[in-house]
């Protein structure tokens, strides 16, 4: 699967990044069903007819589900926030689905309906990506489906959910949080040959713990004769969230260290560069997947588009891209004509690194033994992300509850007469 073309003048920033190394992958950070409406909205916002024509041609290459060999996008990530947004943005479609699912239940309880609707979004996404998965022999076309954030500290509950999600389609990759309970689940899933994505990770210690869990699981799978030919593991490194919650800047102020917005970006990039060095040295059977990517404000550094892309080019990474991030790079694609093929190997400027190393928040994140597993869930970026995902889970539950409450009495009576499920 390659995007090599004779004419490169109309390539997007993400296409240029992918061309640096074919091992780089671009993923879509939303259900595939959201793409057409978002694409049409971007085209409607094009500043002029010429730009609209260029963007139209670029979108024709972006997510080509019926021609996987010519698609820039190679995988999909979802999470409770993205699924809630997708459902809430299509209320007519999903209100019907909620009512249909609710009337098939013995009791009108929003929780099982929530699970059914959540899995339906995942199943539809996996079905959309299945041609790519089949065309590539299972290398591409994966859909990451995250476990319920309310179960992040309950290994047994997560394992039950994970097995159910993995059973939806063979191209579903279960997204497990970076908690001690989550790493227990990862070991067990890998031992069964189930593909995993470790999420809510921001630090080198979490990466090391995931690698240990994966390697333990693979050893168990091998001993049991489990087929892992199409098994895959990625670690979602939420690079932009590390500095976004403000803890690094707050700590810098306490220590009398003057950090600029660019220094914060360097801190985020430094953690990833450390992980990449470990990966290349030891060849661990996991791939890093960068999420929470950001573009830089023009005032930060003239000519700098995105540190997250420009300082990681050349690495064997996957990049899962939010729709807003993609649009921002398209609007500013003239600012970046080409990538430095050796960027991932470029060191953090010594002056910046010297400032960062004075801060425990940075040292704990960049050193392999900087945190114990029982400290992961207390990391500021983890806490803020967990709270956000819980809020959005609640929003989806509220949507489901409203539509169940609105069902007529006749439907409620019909539902109550259904036989009990065993």
Image (tube, grey):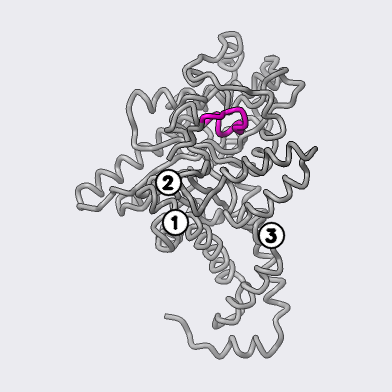
Return the x and y of residue 123 as percentages of the image width and height: 50, 62
The local secondary structure at tag 3 comes to helix
In three-dimensional space, the C-alpha distance between marks 2 and 3, rounded to whole angstroms, equals 31 Å
Which residue occupies the extreme front position in the image?
Answer: 6
Quick one: label 3 or label 1, which is nearer the N terminus?
Answer: 1
Asked whether 213 or 283 is in front, the reply is: 283
Q: Residue at x 77, y 21 (%)?
A: 299
Q: Nearer the viewer, mark 3 or mark 1?
A: 1
| Residue highlighted by disc 3 | 395
The reply, left or right, for residue 74 in relation to residue 321 is left
The answer to whether residue 85 shows anywhere in this view is yes
Quick one: label 1 or label 2, which is nearer the N terminus?
Answer: 1
The answer to whether residue 361 shows anywhere in this view is no
Q: Residue at x 51, y 25 (%)?
A: 313
Quick one: label 2 or label 3, which is nearer the N terminus?
Answer: 2
- Which region of the structure is painted magenta? 6-17
Image quadrant where one finds the C terminus: bottom left
Which label sits on residue 130? 1
Q: Nearer the viewer, mark 2 or mark 3?
A: 2
Which residue occupies the extreme top position in the image?
Answer: 351
| Residue highlighted by disc 2 | 140
Image quadrant where one finds the N terminus: top left
């Amino acid at each position: 699967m390659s995007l090599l073309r004779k004419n490169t003048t109309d390539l997007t920033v993400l296409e240029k990044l992918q061309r640096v190394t074919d091992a780089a992958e671009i993923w879509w950070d939303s259900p595939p069903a959201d793409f057409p409406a978002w694409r049409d909205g971007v085209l409607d916002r094009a500043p002029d007819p010429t730009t609209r024509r260029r963007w139209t041609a670029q979108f024709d290459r972006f997510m080509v589900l019926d021609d996987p060999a010519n698609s820039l996008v190679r995988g999909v990530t979802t999470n409770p926030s993205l699924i809630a947004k997708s459902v809430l943005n299509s209320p007519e479609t999903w209100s019907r689905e909620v009512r249909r699912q609710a009337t098939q239940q013995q009791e009108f309880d929003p929780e099982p309906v929530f699970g059914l609707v959540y899995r339906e979004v995942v199943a539809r996404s996996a079905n959309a990506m299945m041609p790519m998965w089949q065309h590539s022999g299972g290398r591409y076309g994966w859909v990451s489906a995250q476990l319920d954030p309310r179960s992040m500290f309950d290994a047994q509950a997560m394992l039950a959910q994970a097995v159910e999600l993995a059973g939806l389609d063979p191209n579903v990759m279960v997204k497990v949080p970076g908690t001690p309970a989550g790493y227990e689940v990862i070991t067990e899933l890998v031992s069964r040959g189930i593909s995993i994505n470790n999420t809510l990770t921001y630090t080198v210690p979490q990466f090391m713990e995931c690698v240990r869990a994966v390697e333990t699981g693979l050893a168990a799978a091998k001993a049991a004769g489990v087929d892992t030919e199409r098994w895959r593991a990625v670690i979602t490194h939420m690079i932009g969230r590390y500095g976004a919650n403000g803890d690094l800047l707050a700590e810098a102020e306490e220590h009398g260290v003057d950090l600029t917005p660019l220094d914060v970006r360097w801190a985020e990039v430094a953690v990833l560069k450390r992980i990449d060095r470990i990966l290349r040295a030891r060849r661990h059977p996991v791939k890093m997947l960068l999420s929470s990517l950001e573009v830089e404000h023009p005032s930060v550094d003239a000519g700098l588009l995105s540190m997250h892309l420009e300082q990681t080019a050349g690495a064997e990474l996957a990049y899962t891209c939010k729709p807003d991030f993609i649009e921002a790079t398209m609007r500013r694609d003239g600012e970046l004509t080409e990538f430095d093929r050796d960027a991932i190997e470029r060191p953090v400027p010594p002056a910046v690194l010297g400032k960062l190393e004075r801060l425990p928040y940075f040292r704990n994140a960049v050193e392999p033994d900087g945190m114990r597993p029982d400290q992961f869930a207390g990391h500021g970026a983890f806490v803020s992300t967990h709270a956000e995902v819980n809020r959005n889970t609640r929003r989806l539950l509220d949507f489901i509850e409203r539509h169940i409450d609105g069902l007529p009495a006749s439907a409620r009576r019909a539902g109550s007469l259904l036989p009990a499920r065993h």
